[in-house]
Amino acid sequence: MNKWYDVVIIGGGPAGLTAGLYTARAKQRSLLVNKGVVGGIITEAAQVDNYPGFPEGISGLELGELMHKQATKYGLKTITAEVTAIELQEGQKVVKTTEGNFVARAVIIASGSDRQKLGIPGEKEFTGKGVSYCATCDASFFKEQPVAVVGGGDAAIDEALHLAKFASKVIVIHRRDRLRATAILQERTSAEPKIAFRWNSVVEAVEGKDFVERLRLRQVISSEKSVLRVAGIFVSIGLKPDTDYLKDVLPLDATAHIITNEKMETEIAGIFAAGDIRAGSIRQAIAAAGDGATAAFYAKKFIGE
């Protein structure tokens, strides 16, 4: 049976939670549909130092919980479900989910991104058995054991720094000869004796018996192959927008992000997009929150028209 809302928000990261806060405070009947941990991918950050209002920093998990608490205080309803489709029916939007269908006058899509996979032998088989995509979630399982981190951006180096609090050694594997991470994160890695690097290298396979035991590496310049013995591998090579269910609904750019204008409006009236899922996003929590507020403001105007 369909349930009716003024606004259905897809995604529970900073963009979706901020949109929910604004729509709920505006007394619009609002539903937030989220398939994972409330707070989104930011909950994986051990420390967030650049969100205004927290001079000493705050954990991503706590920030997500506080944003959720604030939004639900004003009446935002949240459910855990995966959105499978959006359909247009007689001027209404039907959001189809694994927990039923919901009809809305306006939809704000803020479902963010998923972790990119390496796509190599053993990765899928050992996921949860040494292969991880979240150091904040799993670092404590690798106390005094060697682990690897794949990637060279901010997220990868943040993972490595967090893992260094637990692991005996952290080897960062990067396909280039220098990091893409910000200067301050690079300075922190230089000061951490547990962190080492394998430059110009890629992982070709994950191997082990019941759990991860070793990685097969290839040097991209010389093609020399080697074996790295570790108990775990943390993959942090980028994000993929969660837009597979939208391919036949909305125009997407070349990287599968949703195209919007400055009002967060998509090509379809009454459907908005906010946060990392939007083309042109700078992939920062504070910017995503701003997108969510903007989307909520114009969704309210659309409903009132």
Image: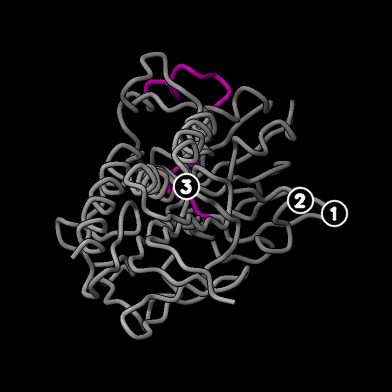
Where is mark 3, residue-wise? 76
Circle 2: residue type? Lys
Using the image, tell me which numbered label, if any, was put on residue 129: 2
Find residue 147 and report its horizontal and vertical position in percent: 65, 38
Would you say the residues marked 1 and 2 are in contact, meaning their CB atoms lie under 8 Å apart?
Answer: yes
Q: Earlier in the sequence, mark 3 or mark 2?
A: 3
Relative to residue 25, is residue 287 drawn left or right?
Answer: left
Where is mark 1, residue-wise? 210
Relative to residue 161, is residue 205 drawn left or right?
Answer: right
Would you say the residues marked 3 and 2 are in contact, meaning their CB atoms lie under 8 Å apart?
Answer: no
Label 3 to label 2: alpha-carbon separation: 37 Å
Residue 278 lies, with reference to residue 181, above or below; the image says below
Find residue 187 and report its horizontal and vertical position in percent: 37, 21
Quadrant placement of the C terminus: bottom left
SS type, badge 1? loop
Label 1 to label 2: alpha-carbon separation: 7 Å
Query: Bounds of the magenta span?
Result: 187-202
Category of crowding for the residue at label 2, using alpha-carbon neighbours closer than 10 angstroms: few (below 14), some (14–19), many (at least 20): some
Q: Nearer the viewer, mark 1 or mark 2?
A: 2
Q: Nearer the viewer, residue 268 or 186?
A: 268
Circle 3: residue type? Leu
The quarter of the picture where residue 148 lies is top right
Q: Nearer the viewer, residue 161 or 74?
A: 74
Residue 89 lies, with reference to residue 167, above or below; the image says below
Circle 1: residue type? Asp
User: Which residue is drawn at the image coordinates 46% and 51% (left, top)?
Assistant: 237
SS type, badge 3? loop
User: Which residue is drawn at the image coordinates 40% and 50% (left, top)?
Assistant: 16
